[in-house]
């Protein structure tokens, strides 16, 4: 299992051609198992959750039909109208993080440190037609001016992320409990204790298998959900015809008025159960519109997942799947349950399983259980994705991110989060033992994130689509009015289980805030204690010490300037490497960064100092590679920069030589007019091969030897200069120094930092920094491990940060 990164294929604007249509039809088929796993299983528990409590005293045929009318219009207005026709148009990889990313790229809302103007030149940075962005509205300037408002915006997004994590605890519990509860309507009825044990066994098995990844069974997700949807459609249609065909008339919104007229306040409270018909997953994933194979599977489910999973499917494919298949199946199933319940009011507690005709009960039960597992699997993997993205924003401690497949992009596994989710899910299952109570918590979590999405979408309409603020206000008021009613009903049920997502989200919010706060303070310390370039220039090219052969890679979060750790090292050691590279690995507010744009190379101090800067940029959805080729790419990129600097006058100015302009150096494709010959020799059971290609004006050959039988891959790389008599002697000398330093060895230099609050700090700040932040730092992965730095080549320098 190997971490991996990359960029999805570009979008194809022509969607009306037959190849595109057939591709979208196939993606629509795949999305059924990936996007709709949990939304399609909601009929298992919606009616039973809605009619629990005082509402069961007012059960009648009119209230049943009114409840169905509410479900129908809720499915129509929120998933179909809001998400399918409006929100999916903001197709920048989907999800809450994508909306926040879009806002940060069109307005100065981002709180990420070390951002640069060069980041705005990334190919994935711009969205839509930029010609509209000619001015700046007063509203935009107002938000950009006030940092507190930008902080509130980030907190809102992170709160949604925390609700997703809480959802990752609740979804497996309610899905598995709901599916196994069908055994209570059989002749050999199981006791509550036996059902609880069975549910726990399924949950433990589900979490225990996460480290294998989902790609091996993902191909089965779509058939399972398709069979499930066809099954519930057939059962619903049978119930409508057999029990009460007049239920079709309940599509009229007049039945909603009758519902609230008869039920009053209890009907409003019942909305907390009815909202479960649209609940789903909320997170951001990847955009792979041109994928037509199962290579590009990701997992998710629910209403919001139709938007979130835009990352792995086209907007058209998700629209086709929902509009023409999922939506009709769900409507007919809810209609069929309403028809059955209107004539069997005493069957509400297990309405779904009781409404299944006896000859097909067991097949439907098996498919229901498998569908519940698919929906649970969806949110677990979604939680891994959300945690990874929070870490990229500097808002979550470092955790181990494992890529579970070499072929399927985006399949990640985080062991620490997996076991935390398992423990919390088992605690919820054992503690509540009731799908109604879990449903109360579940609905509150999902509606909160839906509410946040509506708020962010209104900002997208103004700042990204450049529409009228009145249009955004109309969108906001219309959907907030609908979702606000549901959210208020969900909050009423806080004492009956609704407190769970609030507690879980609060805990994760505290962790995120403390980590973000401590990280920002540490970065600000580095920013205000940078080494003066005048001091370095005064030391001369030797820096006042002995420069020994080799390359020193000095890691820092600073994108400009020289970190304080460097002066600490120089003043305490008598020797340093002849070639120094200040490396900054940072996240940018885009989903992906193309490998061709990942490296920014520049120079620190004049040429004789042999000091360079390398900024490695990743999107918030990129997963860093661990292929052992970083050193070779870095050396090659620096060599390309040296050659580019000699050929292009703008790079040789005095300003750029003193830590100024940087150049984007491709690590994959370089202009074809270059003449580097790459010779690759592979040793694999006596076989060898040679590949030749053009790569660089500065390097003549690169030889790699792989030992495929050894689990630890060995790579030997040798760089040589071409015999070019026209090359500038100064450039040749610098390149020779770079190659010789590479042959001498590479050392990784990092700060072993201790962050402490100043003595003058308040008690609250000292408690947050000295106790909580220090605890998180000691119990998360070290920076060297997170960056895949070889331990044998690591040099750590002790550093105390008083913030």
Image (cartoon, rainbow, N blue to C red):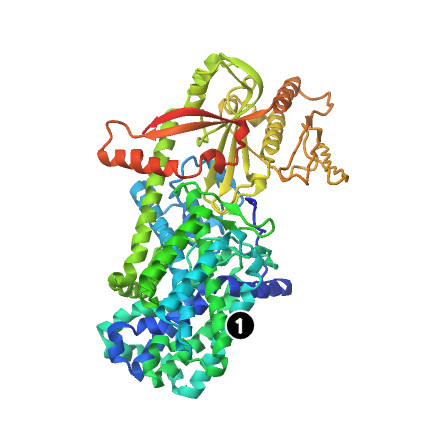
Q: Is residue 287 above or below residue 575?
A: below
Q: Nearer the viewer, residue 461 or 746?
A: 746
Q: Is residue 275 above or below residue 422?
A: below
Residue 755 rendering spot, x and y as whole percentages: 35, 30
Number of other residues with Cα within 10 Å of mark 1, as a class: few under 14, some 14 to 19, many 20 or more: some
In the rendered image, is residue 667 in sight? yes
Whether residue 485 sits left or right of residue 350 in the image: it is left
Task: Give the image location of residue 627, x and y in percent.
Answer: 59, 39
Question: Does 211 sit left or right of 106 as displayed?
Answer: right
Splitting the image into 4 quarters, where does residue 558 fall? top left
Q: Residue at x 32, y 68 (%)?
A: 436
Q: Nearer the viewer, residue 23 or 417?
A: 417
In percent of the image, x 60 and y 48: which residue is there? 406
- Residue 459, given in percent of the width and then of the height, sits at 37, 53
Return the residue at label 1: 227
Q: Which residue is found at the position 42% from the left and 21% from the top?
A: 531
Name the one closer to the observer, 766 or 722: 766
Let me know if residue 307 appears in the view. no
* Quadrant including the C terminus: top left
Horizontal placement of 163 versus 718: left or right? left
**Callout 1: helix, strand or loop?**
helix
- Give the quarter of the image for residue 568: top left
> Residue 599, image x and y in percent?
55, 35
């Amino acid at each position: 299992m190997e971490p991996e990164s990359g960029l999805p294929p570009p979008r194809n604007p022509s969607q009306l051609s037959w190849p595109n249509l057939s591709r979208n039809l196939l993606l629509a088929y795949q999305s059924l198992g990936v996007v709709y796993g949990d939304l399609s299983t909601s009929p298992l528990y919606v009616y039973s959750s809605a009619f629990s409590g005082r509402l069961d005293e007012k059960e009648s045929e009119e209230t049943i039909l009114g409840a169905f009318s509410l479900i129908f219009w809720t499915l129509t207005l929120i998933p179909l109208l809001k998400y399918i026709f409006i929100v999916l148009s903001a197709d920048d990889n989907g999800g809450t993080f994508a909306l926040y990313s879009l806002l940060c790229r069109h307005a100065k809302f981002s709180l990420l440190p070390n951002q640069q103007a060069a980041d705005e030149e990334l190919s994935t940075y711009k969205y839509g037609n930029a010609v509209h962005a000619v001015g700046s509205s007063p509203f935009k300037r107002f938000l950009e001016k006030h940092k507190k408002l930008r902080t509130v915006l980030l907190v809102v997004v992170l709160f949604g992320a925390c609700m997703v994590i809480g959802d990752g605890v609740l979804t497996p519990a309610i899905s598995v409990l709901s599916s196994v509860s069908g055994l209570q309507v059989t002749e050999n009825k199981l006791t509550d204790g036996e059902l609880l044990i069975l549910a726990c066994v399924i949950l433990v098995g589900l979490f225990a298998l996460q480290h294998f990844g989902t790609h091996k069974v993902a191909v089965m997700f779509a058939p399972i959900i398709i069979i499930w949807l066809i099954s519930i459609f057939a059962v619903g249609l049978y119930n409508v015809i057999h029990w009460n065909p007049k239920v079709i008339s309940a599509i009229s919104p007049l039945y909603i008025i009758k519902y609230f007229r008869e039920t009053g306040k209890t009907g409003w409270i019942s909305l907390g159960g009815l909202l479960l018909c649209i609940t789903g997953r909320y997170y951001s994933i990847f955009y792979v519109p041109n994928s037509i194979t199962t290579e590009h599977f990701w997992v998710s489910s629910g209403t919001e997942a139709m938007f979130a999973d835009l990352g792995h499917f086209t907007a058209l494919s998700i629209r086709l799947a929902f509009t023409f298949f999922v939506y009709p199946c769900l409507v007919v199933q809810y209609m069929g349950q309403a028809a059955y319940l209107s004539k069997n009011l005493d069957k509400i507690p297990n309405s779904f399983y009781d409404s299944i005709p006896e000859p097909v009960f067991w097949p439907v039960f098996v498919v229901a259980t498998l569908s519940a597992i698919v929906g649970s699997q969806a949110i677990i993997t979604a939680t891994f994705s959300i945690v990874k993205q929070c870490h990229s924003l500097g808002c979550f401690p470092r955790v181990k991110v494992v890529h579970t497949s070499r072929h399927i992009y985006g399949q990640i596994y985080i062991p620490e989060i997996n076991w935390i989710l398992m423990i919390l899910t088992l605690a919820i299952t054992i503690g509540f033992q009731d799908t109604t109570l879990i449903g109360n918590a579940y609905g509150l979590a999902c509606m909160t994130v839906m509410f946040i999405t509506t708020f962010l979408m209104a900002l997208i309409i103004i700042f990204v689509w450049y529409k009228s603020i009145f249009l955004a206000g109309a969108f906001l008021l219309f959907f907030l009015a609908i979702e606000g009613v549901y959210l208020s009903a969900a909050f009423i049920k806080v004492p009956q289980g609704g407190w769970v997502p609030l507690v879980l989200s609060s805990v994760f919010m505290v962790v995120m805030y403390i980590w973000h706060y401590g990280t920002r303070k540490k970065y600000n310390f580095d920013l205000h204690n940078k080494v003066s370039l005048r001091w370095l220039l005064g030391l001369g090219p030797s820096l006042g010490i002995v420069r020994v052969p080799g390359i020193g890679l000095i890691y820092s979060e600073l994108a400009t300037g020289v970190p304080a750790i460097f002066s600490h090292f120089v003043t305490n050691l008598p020797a340093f490497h002849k070639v120094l590279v200040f490396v900054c690995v940072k996240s940018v507010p885009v989903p992906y960064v193309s490998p061709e744009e990942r490296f920014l190379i520049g120079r620190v101090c004049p040429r004789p100092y042999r000091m360079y800067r390398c900024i490695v940029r990743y999107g918030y959805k990129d997963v860093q590679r661990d292929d052992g080729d970083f050193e070779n790419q870095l050396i090659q990129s620096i060599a390309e920069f040296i050659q580019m600097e000699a050929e292009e006058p703008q790079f040789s100015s005095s300003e750029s030589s003193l830590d100024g302009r940087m150049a984007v150096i491709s690590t994959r494709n370089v202009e074809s007019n270059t003449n580097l010959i790459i010779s690759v020799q592979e040793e694999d059971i006596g076989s060898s091969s040679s590949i030749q290609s053009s790569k660089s004006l500065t390097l003549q050959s690169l030889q790699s030897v792989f030992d495929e039988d050894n689990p630890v891959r060995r790579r030997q790389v040798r760089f040589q200069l071409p015999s070019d008599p026209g090359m500038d002697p100064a450039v040749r000398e610098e390149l020779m120094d770079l190659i010789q330093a590479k042959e001498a060895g590479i050392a990784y230099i990092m700060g072993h930092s201790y962050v402490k609050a100043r003595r003058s700090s308040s008690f609250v700040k000292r408690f947050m920094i000295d106790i909580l932040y220090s605890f998180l730092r000691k119990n998360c992965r070290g920076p060297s491990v997170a960056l895949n730095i070889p331990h044998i080549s690591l040099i750590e320098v002790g550093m105390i940060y008083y913030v």
